[in-house]
Image (cartoon, coloured by chain):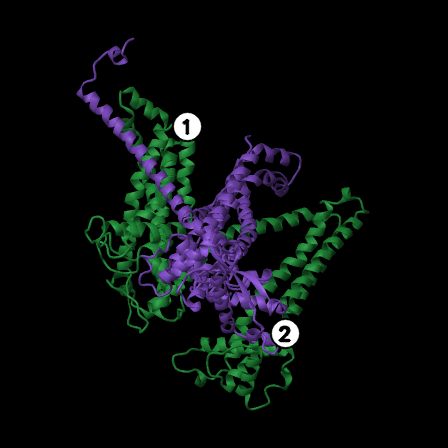
Amino acid sequence: MTPQTLIMAVALLGGIGFFMGRHRALSSADHDPRLLHSRPHYYGGFVCLMTLVPAMLSLAIWVLVQPMVVSSLAGGLVSPQSIPNGSSLGLIMSDVVRMAQALTMAAAQGVIDMDALGDAGDAPAQMADILNAVGIAVGSDMTPDMVQSAMEMVRLTAIGDWAMTIVVGAIALIGFGYSMARMTKSFWARNAVERFILVTLISAAAIAILTTVGIVLSMVFETLRFFSLHEWADFFFGLEWAPNFRGDSALSILPLLWGTLYISVVALLVAVPIGLFSAIYLAEYAAKSTRGVAKPLLEVLAGIPTIVYGLFALITFGPLLKDIFGEGGVLGVGWMGDARSVATAGIVMGIMLIPFVSSLSDDIINAVPQSMRDGSYGLGATKSETVRQVVLPAALPGIVGAILLAASRAIGETMIVVLGAGAIARFAGNPLEALTTITTRIVSQLTGDGDFNSPETIVAFALGLTLFVLTLGLNIIALYIVRKYREQYE
Amino acid sequence: MTNPTNTRTFAPNERVKKRNAAEKRFKGYGLTAIAVALAMLVILIGTILTRGAGAFTQTFVTLNVELLESKLDKSGTRDPAAIAKVTTFGYAPLLKAAMERTVADHNIDTDLKSGDMAKILSKSAVAQLRNLVLSDVSQIGTTVEIRFLANSWIDGYLKGRVTRDSIANNKNVSAAQLDFVDGLRAVGVIEKTFNPDFIFGSDASDQRPEAAGMGVAMMGSFFMMMVVLVLSLPIGVAASIYLEEFAPKNWITDVIEVNISNLAAVPSIVFGILGLAVFINYMHLPQSAPLVGGLVLTLMTLPTIIISTRAALKAVPPSIRDAALGLGASKIQTIFHHVLPLAAPGILTGTIIGLAQALGETAPLLLIGMIGYVATNMPDGIVAGLLDPNSAMPAQIYEWAKRADPAFYERAWGGIIILLVFLISMNVLAIWLRRKFERRW
């Protein structure tokens, strides 16, 4: 049985179980629901769950594990001689998997008879015909042992599918029988079902942890692989980034880090003054109606997708800067060669970050107790003096937290720099020149036909891990500061 | 009348004047900052609208094409198989002839050869003609009126993007052709009208910007959002219920909480790396599939949904829980029968906002192969929609922006308008829901 039909069958059994369980429980109480411990549908639900859940879980595990087991068993048939230089068992096996697919498809279409295959000595030629017939292409040369391995794979898969049907079916039936046997009026069905619901809730909460673990593990694993191919000290402390696919790449993060930080600083130079002054005005000066209009409008800036900012930088803002500072521009200074530059990406990113600074700062300024302001006014200070000398110092930790959050956004931002910053990795100081960032290099190393065994491709995982650690660090510090600050006045 | 300044008990001295000026300046800075920020918003929206509006109209050329039997069906049997053997090359002469006839009918004065006249049509015109003939072979021998797309240069000329100066050294279009277009336009053969194919059609290769549309990418986004909704809503709500209602205060739940707030701030590209490593390289799910995109976006959306759901659950007053518990309901019954329905509007609002964020997200989609792919085929059915390679709206916009052609730039801006219409409607829906069901206890 295929997994799909198996799922249908088990689901059907679960559905039947619901009604049978309910009926049986009611029968044991002479069809008087008041005599049952729980309401009738909890009994049905218990049978349904006991039938479905263990069976489905085992099915899921089986479906995930079976291909791995089959592939390692069948892979043993491939002799080391048939692995060409520069290739690996993994690559050969993907061809073997494709051949096995072709065999299964051909058998399903009735093109071949599985039992009749394999006796003939010209297996590769036969295989080629079959592949042609079903329209599947194989990359490497086929050898008899590969064909043998593919046939073994088909055989093992068939056995595995049978075993799966039997095991999963048995688990479903056992669950069904066990729960049906407990359908008496004194059984605490509600508590059993609720225990199950609680477990479901806990596992849902655990997914948040699993995601983080998944992120970290997937990147740590690949990063370690990268460091086995490339010196780690060179990655962290080298001064050159020049990947090429001949194998002698310079892969160091420092030039990228320089570009990332430079662009982020430009972005913050735009976002912090505008955001902070907006927040001060909205919190201290603006009338309630102005605030009600201006604040949501500012927040629209944060809701616009970053691809829009990227396009704005690439098509509108970059060329505009070039018209001013570029060759033959308004100023006639010729400082800018390309529309993509640190300033292009940085300033546009700064616009995007304004609401990140202003909204959080606004909240924090509002959280400063009114009594502090009143005290300052009472001593004769003007409003601006109060803001500068009383409110801002009191709100400073929170504002620093807001700026750090904006900084972590800026470092991790991708689309604006991919479209607006350029692709040159170097330590340049001119903000009108192109630089590149960590995120753009991740995109460029991982898009296209990368080979996941070459350091030029998997360096992206090391870059990603560095980025993750960097932003995570900033976030934890920022959230800690903000939370600490909030407690201070609560 | 007394002048208010004269009623002061003391005359403002230098220092007070200075302080008042500083006060005014400070207020001015604040106002300027807000004005600058809002001006940026206006400029951004203005740029999008002015640059993108053109994508919704397209230049069409209406021609009377005589479907000559001698060219298309030499045997005269009307056998579809035989007619299908005529390639698009066989149809090109028909277009040239139709152009010549149009010129003759309308007495247009031009020196162009018929081949150059036909070049103002899109490269897709021959295929369009061929498909039309193959759809109904009985039309052969008759003359049919057909609306063809003009190529992107002519379209740009009508939209003001292409001028005679800008094409001085251009091999694709000549000034004579533009004069010819002016002539055709005067008699109404060429016209610029609304083009629904931009919204509902499929992407086209980089040679035919005039034929590219958002429709297929929109379906890709739709399937991704379905995956996000189906996975992140139940998981997010379940996780929030546990954390808010059941979780004991210990280090494990602390770790989970810190985790969730940090996940919300992880750069989106990191989720893309996760998707590539786990879903594609390890689990071997198909590249470019909306299913994978949906899974990655689910992980990104979960924190948003969890945070807003917890806020909604927290807002339900404890008296509701106490009343239910007092009547003998179990804790689970209390939550599922009483607390959750009351928190539902808040949860829904948070979910819609989370989906809107996911809809506009681009960076992770780049890594799982949703660019560099020309989305030409509408998915047929749900399984194909989830597993077949597709694009998504923001990925499609990026793809167009990358093609570095002014005609595609226009389409990228137009695509942004479509994307923003979706985002705005989702956010308006969320705000409306909040206003309508908001409850003060």
Q: Nearer the viewer, residue B157 or A408?
A: B157
Residue A288 tag number: 1
| Numbered disc 2: secondary structure | loop
Chain B colour as displayed = purple
The answer to whether one can see residue B252 in this image is: no
Residue ID at (55%, 38%): B433
Q: Chain of mark 2?
A: B
Q: Nearer the viewer, residue A194 or A136?
A: A136
Describe residue A76's horizontal placement relative to residue A159 as left or right. left
> Mark 1 belongs to which amino acid?
Lys
Residue B373 location (% of width, % of height): 46, 64
Chain letter of the green region: A
The answer to whether one can see residue B198 in this image is: yes
> Mark 2 belongs to which amino acid?
Arg
Task: Measure the alpha-carbon separation of dots 1 and 2.
Answer: 76 Å
Q: Residues within 10 Å of mark 1 (few under 14, many from 20)?
A: few
Query: Mark 2 highlights which residue?
Result: B78
Q: Nearer the viewer, mark 1 or mark 2?
A: 2
Work out whether B43 lies above or below B204: above
